[in-house]
Amino acid sequence: MIDRKACTCIHIEPIRDQVKEKYGNINCGNDIHPETWNRYPCELNTKTKCQNDHCDGKINFLVSIPTRDIKIITALFIRKERRGYALLNQALRNLFEEGILEKIETVDKELDMPIIPLPVKYYKNPPLPSHSFEKK
């Protein structure tokens, strides 16, 4: 059985409208359509190889508050609803705190897998794998 994870999201349409009204230079990744900010159906779903109820992607745009900066939204697309949402994470909260976005209602969604992989710790000089010390 697949573990389901609850997350707090915001509908992507009001975010899209507010950002497009205020800023240009919007770049969408992972096959997201720049006009709709949608990714339905994704390539894997079209080929019926996808096992998940959603897919995700990134949307970034440039702002000048206080200096030129790139802001990133983590977008989720729930296939059953054919609708996009933005994950309410710290990056999205910062957009509200900085006044880039104004009040938008949140919704809770339950998805069938973790949305964002756990952070990976990178070292300047990573340790060698233990098997490299074994005698041959």
Image (spheres, helix red, strand yellow):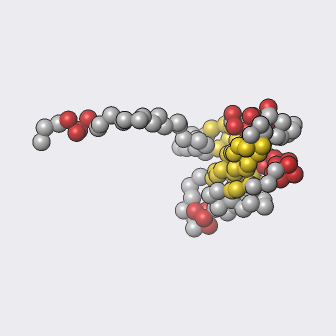
Q: In the visual, does 117 lie left or right of 69? A: left
The quadrant where residue 47 appears: bottom right
- Assign the C terminus to one quadrant of the image: top left
Judge by depth and name the residue closer to the eye, 90 or 111. 90
| Percent coordinates x, y for residue 54 in the rendering | 65, 51
Judge by depth and name the residue closer to the eye, 109 or 130. 130
Q: In the visual, does 126 lie left or right of 119? A: left
Residue at 74% from the left image edge and 60% from the top image edge? 34
| Percent coordinates x, y for residue 119 in the rendering | 52, 36
Q: Residue furthest front?
A: 67
Residue at 69% from the left image edge and 37% from the top image edge? 91
Relative to 86, does residue 43 appear above or below in the rendering? below
Residue at 79% from the left image edge and 32% from the top image edge? 97
| Percent coordinates x, y for residue 64 in the rendering | 78, 43
Q: Residue furthest bottom?
A: 47
The quadrant where residue 132 appears: top left
Residue 75 seen in this snapshot: no
